[in-house]
Amino acid sequence: MQFIFDPILHIIALIAGLILVQLALSSHGVLRFVGNLIFFLLLSALLLMNGVEPYSTTQPSSDLWHRLFFGLAKAIWWLGGAMMLVSSVRLFLIFEHRPREARLAQDLLAGIIYVGAALSVVAYVFSVPVGTLIATSGVFAVILGLALQSTLSDVFSGIALNLGRPYSVGDWIILPDGVQGRVMETNWRATHLLNATNDLVVIPNSMLAKTQLVNFNGPDETHGVTIAIKLLPIRPPAAIEQLLGTVLLSSNRILRNPAPLVAIKGLDSHGIDVELSFRVHDAGQAAAATNEIYDLIYRHTQAADVPLSAADLTLMRPVWQTSASQPDPAKAPWRLLKAMTLFSTLTEEEFEILASSLVRRTYGKGTEIITQGIKAPCLNLIHNGVVVVERHEAGMTTELNRLSPGDFFGERGVLIGAEEPGTIRALTFVVAYEVSAAPLAEIMRNRPALAEELGMTLAHRLEDERHLAGLDGPRTEHPESLARRIRHLFQLQHHPVI
């Protein structure tokens, strides 16, 4: 039974256990670190109990096989210590929750630890002077350095970029040649970007270290956007500034803080140059916000009869205006209906039916138009101004939507008999036209397919409000179900769209 207490068997068992730990726990950083630590402590205790000092060149036995085995055990001890330190480095960086960004730092530290362990094995196991070994390998190091000059430049540039931290994983950067994208990874040789077309762009670290770059996420993730437009000088600049301030006020995609700005940049006989400046949550939302602002500029300027600048005024007649002269107020309801996509498929006769039934309403700034939980009796079409939809719940106020000229509200009560999800309030002076249920019912009896179109429009509105409110999950209402509710409320027969 004496062989059971043989230290050689104990060391072999420990080595087998280390191999199993590395294979079984390769994807578990914490458990792998604990396993390496236990192996290192047990092997240290076992070697010291048998008179073997891993950090000494003396041999405890004159027997050749024992000397060979204990030499191997000392080498494994240094390797086990290196593995324990490397796993602790990996574990620390994982606890920092940024393992991908710190991959270069991880590899660099791991390389230093393993090189140190290898030199220790050479010094304490093979009794070779490390200084002499380094001196004799100097020529080889020079040759290798010249051969790997480009690679080493990328490596050291990567180290400098990680220390200087001009960007981090997840930041959106742009280079002078127009290459831009979100940083996905920085490794030994290159930085990987994911551009707007979802393609991977690989840029050598040495190139990034030498060039100028713009970080859209610094000092924070918000991104500034500037839009320049030119309007005809038919209104004073102060009135134009107020009009375009209303445009920014009606946006659902831009940040309210810092406040967006309207700046008059020039004035001549051809037009008023205006610059709109605003910020979005991140660079990825800049395109969508810009598109929304351009759409709002068009709608608000058409509603206010302020055309965009053109060499020939007759080329810029507003959609809601029949001539370049002052519009006819009596035709305002008809022009409003014509400009709304909700009624784009109606015939001229149906337009006249709706236009003749519209009732003009005006609301002062801050006026509560419809209270949350009320079934709106009429569909309201916005002609001028901005309204906001706010939900009040559990002492908190959540903004659901902002509506501008050409938008509508109150459709839930009229079309499906539902209550309003939030209070509708005027943010500016508002001019709106009411459409009662009776003319809508008359049109839908003659055109039952309109129920499907209204159901689709209402579904898009609900989805937009869910998105703006930050709600996730599947749709609560589908166009088909909304169309069925509209047909049921107006007592229409189902006519499938062909």
Image (cartoon, rainbow, N blue to C red):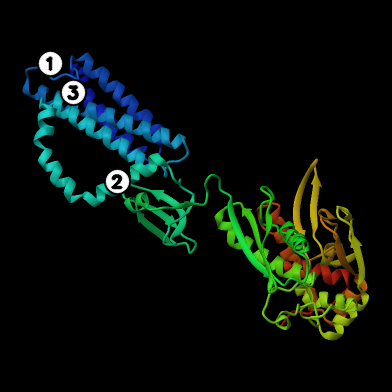
Q: Secondary structure at mark 2?
A: helix
Q: Quadrant of the C terminus?
A: bottom right
Please tell me in which quadrant of the rendered image residue 85 appears. Answer: top left
Q: Give the mark toward the camera: 1 or 3.
A: 1
Residue 476 seen from this side:
no
- Name the residue that disc number 3 marks: 8
Q: Earlier in the sequence, mark 1 or mark 3?
A: 3
Residue kind at label 2, given as amino acid type: Val
Q: CA distance from mark 1 to mark 2?
A: 44 Å
Q: Nearer the viewer, residue 489 or 367?
A: 367
Number of the label disc, if any, that sits on residue 38: none
- Name the residue that disc number 2 marks: 155
Can you give x and y, in whole percent of width and height, for residue 128 in the image?
A: 10, 27
Can you give x and y, in whole percent of width and height, for residue 8 in the image?
A: 18, 23
Residue displayed at 38% across by 53% down: 211
Q: Nearer the viewer, residue 339 or 460?
A: 339
Residue kind at label 3, given as amino acid type: Ile
From this viewpoint, which residue is outermost toward the front?
268
Q: CA distance from mark 3 to mark 2?
A: 43 Å
Can you give x and y, in whole percent of width and height, for residue 114 in the image?
A: 25, 34
The answer to whether 433 appears left or right of 291 in the picture is right
